Image (cartoon, rainbow, N blue to C red):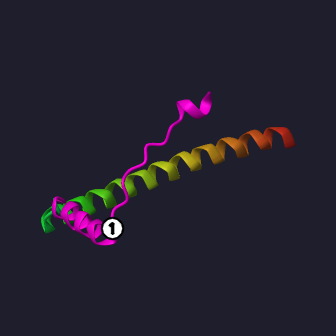
Amino acid sequence: MAEEAVEKVQKPRVSPGEFVRQVRSETGKVVWPTRAETIQTTILVLVMTSLLALFFLGVDQVLGRIVKFLLSLGGA
């Protein structure tokens, strides 16, 4: 029963030459970003990563101090 429900659809095999032609055709449809867009996106990624790094540093420091405080209560 399960075998009947899961039937694989077999696609026709493509020759290597045809495959390369299809890849070139699809690559031609790609819209590459301009130099300005690439620089702008790179700067945005660097800024966001830096902000997130600072945020997680702050969270880590706060949680670390809370844990130290709680552990000092148990050792007293």
- Give the answer, above or below, for where 3 lies relative to 54: above
Q: Is residue 58 left or right of residue 74?
A: left
| Residue at horizontal 79 percent and vertical 43 percent from the top | 72
Q: Neighbour class for label 1 at 10 Å: few (<14), some, many (≥20)?
A: few
Pick the quarter of the image with the N terminus.
top right
| Residue at horizontal 50 percent and vertical 37 percent from the top | 7
Residue 76 visible to the viewer: no
Q: Is residue 34 left or right of residue 69?
A: left
Q: Nearer the viewer, residue 31 or 55?
A: 31
The residue pinned by badge 1 equals: 15
Q: Is residue 70 left or right of residue 29?
A: right
In the image, farthest residue toward the bottom:
17
In the image, farthest residue toward the top:
1
Asked if the stretch drawn in magenta spans residue 10, the answer is yes
The residue segment tinted magenta is: 1-30
| Residue at horizontal 27 percent and vertical 67 percent from the top | 18
Q: Picture coordinates of residue 50 (x, y %)? A: 39, 58
Q: Picture coordinates of residue 29 (x, y %)? A: 16, 59
- Give the answer, above or below, for where 5 lies relative to 31: above
Asked if the stretch drawn in magenta spans residue 14, the answer is yes
Residue 20, picture quadrant: bottom left
The residue type indicated by label 1 comes to Ser
Residue 75 visible to the viewer: yes
| Residue at horizontal 56 percent and vertical 31 percent from the top | 4
- The secondary structure type at the circle numbered 1 is loop
Q: Picture coordinates of residue 49 (x, y %)? A: 39, 56
